[in-house]
Amino acid sequence: MPIQIPARLKDRVEQLFERMDNAYDRAAEQSGFVCNGCENNCCMTRFDHHTLLEFLYLREGLARLPSGLRETLRQRALAVMEQAADLQRRRKAVRVMCPLNEDGRCILYAHRPMICRLHGIPHALRRPDGTVQTGPGCDDYYAQCGASTRNRLDRTPLYVAMAQLEQLLRTELRFDRKIKMTVAEMIVDNSVKFKV
């Protein structure tokens, strides 16, 4: 049986992702931003994900899908990985639709990773040394809301909570490997071993 997020952590994981969604919704509402499938779709952006928690949560969502759909997604993910590798070899920008996107919507929306929940809104992150790192919104944000960044989404408490849960999960599963995976790689990957 594949390793899963332990039951005692499951509620905390779901609550954290709900906090992320709520924080995003508040920031979007304060700015007047509506994310609704723009031409420069963030689902075509290559994001690397670095937590075991996101990997296992996405895989949990996949496991709930019918086996035929899982295989379809696996084939799509392999094609995305091949396209991305080809673009990288040719030193081109990697802009390939996420294999979970179907008709402009995410098949695993409830199980999507952190950046998929927070992307698009200008944000701030307080680093441990006290400096504040800021990031821009997406192009559609600026088209709708202008250049004002007064409603920056403070990602700090969300990142801290994610790091704490990640540490608890890794300790419990005795997992110390680094992770750097795209959604396509998470769908395809069967090599990550979680033997305890």
Image (spheres, helix red, strand yellow):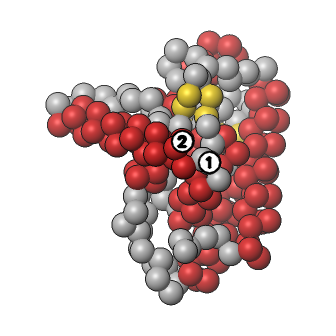
Q: Residues within 10 Å of mark 1 (few under 14, many from 20)?
A: few
Residue kind at label 1, given as amino acid type:
Leu
Q: Is residue 126 above or below residue 119?
A: below
Identity, as a three-letter code, of the amino acid under mark 2: Leu
> Picture quarter containing residue 143?
top right
User: What is the C-alpha distance between the residues marked 1 and 2?
Assistant: 6 Å
Residue drawn at point x = 53 percent, y = 65 percent: 52
Secondary structure of the residue carrying tag 1 is loop
Residue 4 in the image: state x and y as whole percent.
61, 70
User: Residue at left 27%, top 39%?
Assistant: 82
Closest to the observer: 67 or 120?
67
- Label 1 with label 2: CB-CB less than 8 Å: yes
Position of the N terminus, as image quadrant, is: bottom right
- Residue to which mark 1 is pinned: 65
Question: Residue 20, percent across and down?
Answer: 73, 48
**Residue at 24% across / 32% down in the picture?**
87
The residue furthest bottom is: 196
The spot of residue 101 in percent (x, y) is 54, 31
Classify residue 102 by image quadrant.
top right
Q: Residue 47: in sight, yes or no?
A: no
Residue found 57% across the figure and 62% down from its top: 56
